[in-house]
Amino acid sequence: MKTIFISEGDPTSINYELLGSSFPLLTSLGKKHRIYLIRGPHNQTLSQAKQVTKPVDEPGFYTIGWGSGKPKSFVLGKPSKSSGKMAYDTLLATIDFQKQYGGDIITLPLSKEWVQKAGVKGFRGHTETLAEAYKRPTFMMMSGEKWNVIPLTTHVPLKDVVKELKNFDWKELKNAILRSPYLNHPTIGYLGLNPHAGEGGKIGTEETTILKSGVGVLRKAKLAVEGPLSADSAFLPGAKVYDLYLAGYHDQGLIPFKLLEGKKGVNITLGLDFTRVSPDHGTAFGIAGKGCADPTGLISCLERLVETK
């Protein structure tokens, strides 16, 4: 029996539509597992779910209210400082529950913009918050039916990518890859940072300096690594397929991943002693409340968690 905690994310987003659409699966999985939605005090509800004040021993799908005061009356599609703060607070509460009771975590989408507007300075995202909370390096792996991609730098401005790569912890990445239940000594292709993988140093030298040195750490661990690959053709039909791709920065890896995997892709955090997953889409405030949100991402997250032992 697994224990799964779900942080509600931004309550003005599509998240409660996703939960409602996924309710049959949540109740079905709740026959064998303990699943808890951690939510703040507001007017978006899942009336069918059992409400408890803390985790219980019996399997089921439950909601745990977090926070005090008069419930907020949020309007779907209208994020605010209050919704951003509540999303962040319930994320921290979810982490606290996981530390106390164990289990895995699903994080539903929140808005980095509104979390920061709520006064949470330096917030960069779930992956970075988990690294801080558990005091260890974490790595974002986008995982789908066919493709797995790790961006070596995540939510940083493009101008800071090279600086971040110089400080990248390749040893911890190696350890995270070897420990992951989703990777079994994978074949790895790494993308060149510059156009055409640097053209032998004619369009940049990061491939022969920073990346070459870092990849050497993976090769010493007997991991099969090839590259640098030209990023503009690595994912084309007919190109050699690897179990795992390492991208230099966020969009270099996530644009082709999302185009190829669509809504079935999930974000898996490597480096933790448990599994954290999240849908690979965002808050979608523009369609919140219109009844057209697709729960495929959340369903994929649930399926990923229950398929591993």
Image: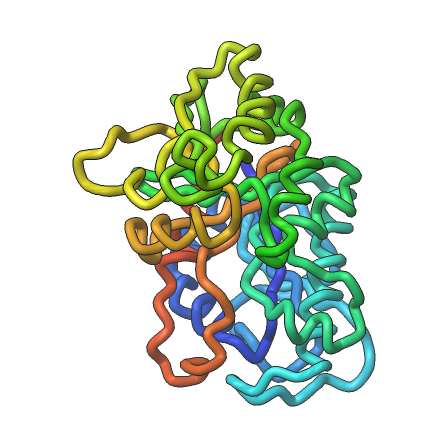
Q: Nearer the viewer, residue 71 or 31?
A: 71
Image side of residue 73 versus residue 54, left or right? left
Q: Quadrant of the N terminus?
A: top right
Residue 305 visible here: no
**Going 73% across and 42% down the picture, which residue do you hit?**
101
**Residue 12 picture location, percent across and down:** 56, 80
Colouring chosen for the image of the structure: rainbow
Image side of residue 31 versus residue 154, left or right? left
**Residue 30 picture location, percent across and down:** 49, 50
Q: Nearer the viewer, residue 65 or 83?
A: 83
**Residue 42 picture location, percent across and down:** 66, 81
Q: Quadrant of residue 149?
A: top left
**Going 45% across and 45% down the picture, which residue do you hit?**
142
Q: Quadrant of residue 273?
A: top right
**Going 42% across and 29% down the picture, which residue do you hit?**
200
**Residue 282 picture location, percent across and down:** 49, 66
**Going 38% across and 50% down the picture, which residue do you hit?**
265
Q: Quadrant of residue 179?
A: top right
Q: Is residue 10 above or below residue 59?
A: below
Q: Residue furthest front?
A: 202
Q: Is residue 216 above or below residue 271?
A: above
Q: Is residue 13 above or below residue 173?
A: below
Residue 277 visible here: yes
Q: Nearer the viewer, residue 162 or 262?
A: 162
Q: Nearer the viewer, residue 123 or 36?
A: 123
Q: Is residue 119 above or below residue 140?
A: below
Count the numbered circles shown.
0
